[in-house]
Image (cartoon, grey):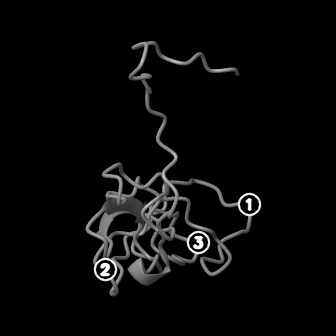
Amino acid sequence: LCGHICKSLCHPTGHDPMRYLCPQKCLRTRSTCNHSCVKKCHELCGDCTVLVEKFLPCGHVVKTECHIDESSLICNQRCLNKLECGHLCANTCGDVCSIICEEKVKKTYLQCKKQPKHSG
């Protein structure tokens, strides 16, 4: 019924082709994305799980399953926005930018030209 030629000489379910579960690769192509189904012939195709690159509104690209809508994705790459001090925001792109800079910088005392020792 599926179009595959049965390779079994004997069937545990008898000769009823309606009860036989074809173990071969599914031949169906999805109408939503044109990817081939990756399951076995007797299984339901379900959502497309082929990994594809999707472009997010922020400009970053993520690799995710084909069926996942871009609007439900949150970018987890580093934020590229600059803070008032000139350093990059420490948050991920999908988060709200930080207000306080968390960049560690070396500080030199002008009077003695020494750098303070960090505890920790």
Q: Considering only order in the chain, which callout, 1 or 3, is on the residue closer to the N terminus?
A: 1
Disc 2 residue type (three-letter): Cys
| Drawn side of residue 96 relative to residue 61, left or right | right
The residue where tag 1 is placed is: 12
From the top left corner, tell me how far across and down residue 38 is, in percent.
45, 62
What whole-number distance in Å separates the C-alpha atoms at marks 3 and 1? Answer: 19 Å
Mark 2 residue element: loop
Q: Considering only order in the chain, which callout, 1 or 2, is on the residue closer to the N terminus?
A: 1
Q: Residue at x 44, y 77 (%)?
A: 67
Closer to us: 78 or 45: 78
Closer to us: 51 or 100: 100
The residue where tag 2 is placed is: 33
Look at discs 3 and 1 and give the one toward the viewer: 3
The residue where tag 3 is placed is: 43
Q: Are marks 3 and 1 in contact (CB under 8 Å)?
A: no
Q: Are marks 2 and 1 in contact (CB under 8 Å)?
A: no
